[in-house]
Image (spheres, helix red, strand yellow):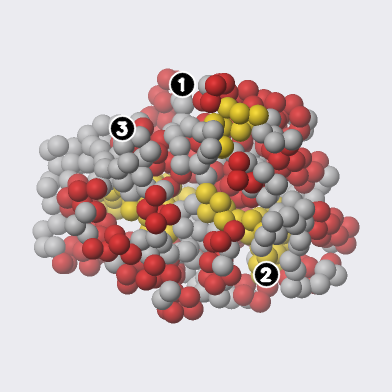
Amino acid sequence: MRQRLLAASGIAVVSAVLATTLSGCGSGSGSDSKTIKVVYQQVLNNSNKVQATYLAPMVEAFEKAHPGTKVKLVPVTASENDYYTKIQLMMRSPSTAPDLVYEDTATINSDVAGGYLRPLDPYLSSWADWSQYAAPSKAAMKYAEDGKTYGVPDNTDTRGIWYNKTVFQQAGIPVPWQPKTWDDVLAAARTVKARLPGVTPINVYTGVAGGEQSSMQGFEMLLYGTPAANNALYDTTQKKWVVGSKGFRDALDFVHTVYSTGIGPTAQKALGANFTAEVGTELLPQNKLAIDLDGSWMPNNWIRTGPKPWPEWQKSMGMAAMPTQSGQGSGKVSMSGGWAWSIPAKSGNPDLAFAFLKSLETKAASSRWNSVNATIPVRKDVASDPAYLKSLPTNAFFAALVPDTFYRPGLPAYAQVSSAIQKAMEAVTTGQSSVDKAASQYDSDVKTAVGADKTVQGAQ
């Protein structure tokens, strides 16, 4: 979820589209003191209703425990980028602001900077359960300028490689499979291309339509696997954004290789707004995709309550850690993010909103949510809970990637930097620009967004 710079005409168009949603979403100063509105994302053209299914009985239990209260769930059906824009439009006015909103942890700082969120410190200081939250997750909720906390995280995640063992065996690639370098990944994809016509060898999310999944699963999984990983995107010592680095060009060249040599999806398909759902519910279950750079949450597509129940997924799908570029360092890399509940600054009923938030974040509720959502808990007592660890056979694998994971810079400017990454990826995916030209445009876009004095030349 990130702050986006929109032209006035763009805001007008989006506002018109939102009219129906917004008209039923306001709390405002005159709202019923026992009613709250809770906003979360329903992915566009995706039948995955895991969160809706989880929240419905939680609402029922809360209303029963608090007679006279009313919790109205407001799913916002939108693509990732559009969801960020829509909730920001909602939060601008007391008449449309929800009381509780589901936020990507990467966008909390930008939303705080925009004045959209309320600090939660007065509530957290008297909430005993807050001590159970892991320190890094707490830190991600703080705004650097004032040190206050603006969200309660309810999960984190890691990313790696999903590979279809059925496809690998048909292509003659031994399983289990653990590539040691980028070249190993590309070699496997080329083998699939040569031996299995009609199967897409590898998916790397790319382009503007993919939003943050393009930046994280597609690009940063590569970028943070280069030798200058610790200063790949932002130099924390100099407090400047990195431009002109060899690692950036190498990561972009990997994307270019995938799409220019025909081992990835067609550019038209990869840049489509519905491609995420297609990967999880069609290509992988139908044995039409061999390798997918993706996240720990993928089983959500295939479990009994998912949009594409696939009983064979545990036998058909394998997991591998994403290797670093040349196998340097620990030899593997991951990226972590997550989601959190925040209270908008213009909520009409923050006290009741936090009471409902607490009900969503008890040990039992957190364990249940992270189990059904195939995510990694941020509560220490849940992370060690045998019930959680046994709920999915993939939980232990993805939790074990945490020591090798990286987090996006928690700064408001990350929103514009991420957008610049997506533009650069799209340019090389379509063949519109060479790697060098796209990387140069990225440098220019970042300097424009943050100021040239806030950038530093990266390692060569």
Residue count near mark 3 (Cα–Cα under 10 Å), binned few <14, some 14–19, many ≥20: some
| Pointer 3 residue | 115
Q: Classify 121 as above or below 59.
A: above
Please tell me which residue is depicted at 23% across the width and 63% down the height of the picture.
128
Q: Which mark is residue 7?
A: 1
* SS under mark 1: loop
Q: Quadrant of the N terminus?
A: top left
Circles 1 and 3: CB distance less than 8 Å? no
Residue 248 x, y percent position in the rendering: 69, 38
Q: Mark 3 is on which residue type?
A: Gly
Instruction: Compare residues 387 and 455 and report the one nearer the observer.
Output: 455
| Residue lying at 36% horizontally and 44% vertically, measured from the top left | 142
Residue 136 in the figure: left or right of residue 393 = left
Q: Secondary structure at mark 2?
A: strand
Q: How many marks?
A: 3
Identity of the residue drawn at 20% across and 48% down: 122
Q: Nearer the viewer, residue 320 or 275?
A: 320
On the image, the x and y values in percent for residue 301 come to 54, 63
Question: Which residue is label 2 attached to?
Answer: 318
Q: Earlier in the sequence, mark 1 or mark 3?
A: 1
> Quick one: label 2 or label 1, which is nearer the N terminus?
1
Going by the numbered disc 2, the residue's amino acid type is: Gly
Location of residue 254 in the rendering, given as x and y in whole percent from the top left corner: 75, 44
The residue at 49%/78% (across/down) is 390
Residue 344 % position (x, y)? 28, 41
Horizontal side of 125 relative to 426 (left or right) equals left
